[in-house]
Image (cartoon, grey):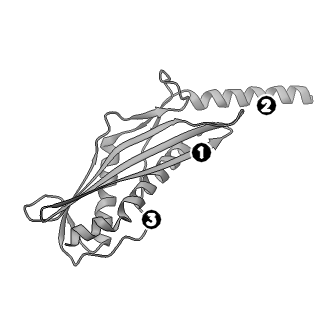
């Protein structure tokens, strides 16, 4: 095979793989994990813990960046909520409290809400692609008539030469949500109010 034919074949394969990367939706099932140490404030008190995903749709963006594209990125709120619940309970347990599911009068309460999760096109130099990711978590702690609400934003911009496949997109979203969880549970005001 001549060098010219090999080069031509390589260009065809590259173009085909680029098109294949854009063809259909990516259904992501991220499993975010908090990695930071949380403030130890509790002494075994019960805390009601609830996680919610209040996004209006499962589609968080498109891989092409155009609104009408079928190359959508999907994170189902119904699948993500139990994972956020598990991480919220783990954080509360690591703070020294005992997480429970049901709210009760007089019991401290923590609600973790995913308010926003976006996947969009970022700014990049010519011949390079870029994706911009944003996640916003809200944590609301209530205890003894006092409420504290914190908002925690994680952002990431990733450049690439070849469009990310499903696995790469899943890893980026997982890291983004894990960063947002870290930011939320590092807030000493949450643990302080729950322990009051």
- In the rendered image, the quadrant that contains the C terminus is bottom left
How far from the left and from the top, in percent, is residue 86? 31, 58
Residue at position x 28%, y 41% in the image: 54
Mark 2 vs mark 1: which is more N-terminal? 2
Marks 3 and 1, Cα distance to the nearest angstrom?
21 Å
Callout 2: few (<14), some (14-19), or many (20+) C-alpha neighbours within 10 Å?
A: few
Callout 1: few (<14), some (14-19), or many (20+) C-alpha neighbours within 10 Å?
A: some
Residue identified by numbered label 3: 35
**Lateral position of residue 153 relative to residue 104, left or right:** right
How far from the left and from the top, in percent, is residue 17? 66, 31
User: How many numbered callouts?
Assistant: 3
Residue identified by numbered label 2: 10
- In the rendered image, the quadrant that contains the N terminus is top right
**Lateral position of residue 190 relative to residue 159, left or right:** left
Q: Which residue lies furthest to the left in this view?
A: 105
Q: What element carries label 1?
A: strand
Marks 2 and 1, Cα distance to the nearest angstrom?
26 Å
How far from the left and from the top, in percent, is residue 185? 36, 63
Q: Residue 158 carries which label?
A: 1
Residue at position x 35%, y 64% in the image: 187
Q: What element carries label 2?
A: helix
> Observer-nearest residue: 28 or 68?
68
Q: What element carries label 3?
A: loop
Proximity of marks 2 and 1: CB atoms separated by less than 8 Å:
no
For residue 165, say whether it is visible. no
Marks 2 and 3, Cα distance to the nearest angstrom?
42 Å
Residue at position x 34%, y 33% in the image: 57
Q: In which quarter of the image is residue 43?
A: bottom left
Q: Which residue lies furthest to the bottom in this view?
A: 43
Nearest to the eye among marks 2 and 3: give it. 3
């Amino acid at each position: 095979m001549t060098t010219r034919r090999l080069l031509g074949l390589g260009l065809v394969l590259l173009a085909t793989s680029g098109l294949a990367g854009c063809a259909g939706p990516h259904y992501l099932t991220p499993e975010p994990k908090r990695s930071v140490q949380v403030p130890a404030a509790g002494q075994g008190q019960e805390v009601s813990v609830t996680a919610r995903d209040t996004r209006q749709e499962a589609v968080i963006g498109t891989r092409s960046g155009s609104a009408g594209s079928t190359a959508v990125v999907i994170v189902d709120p119904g699948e993500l909520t139990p994972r956020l619940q598990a991480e919220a309970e783990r954080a509360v347990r690591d703070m020294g409290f005992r997480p429970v599911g049901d709210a009760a009068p007089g019991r401290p309460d923590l609600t973790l809400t995913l308010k926003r999760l976006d996947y969009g096109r970022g700014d990049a130099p010519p011949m390079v692609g870029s994706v911009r990711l944003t996640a916003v978590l809200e944590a609301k702690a209530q205890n003894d008539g006092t409420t504290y609400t914190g908002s925690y934003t994680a952002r990431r911009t990733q450049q690439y030469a070849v469009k990310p496949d499903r696995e790469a997109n899943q890893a980026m979203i997982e890291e983004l949500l894990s960063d947002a969880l870290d930011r939320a549970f590092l807030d000493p005001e949450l643990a302080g109010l729950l322990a009051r």
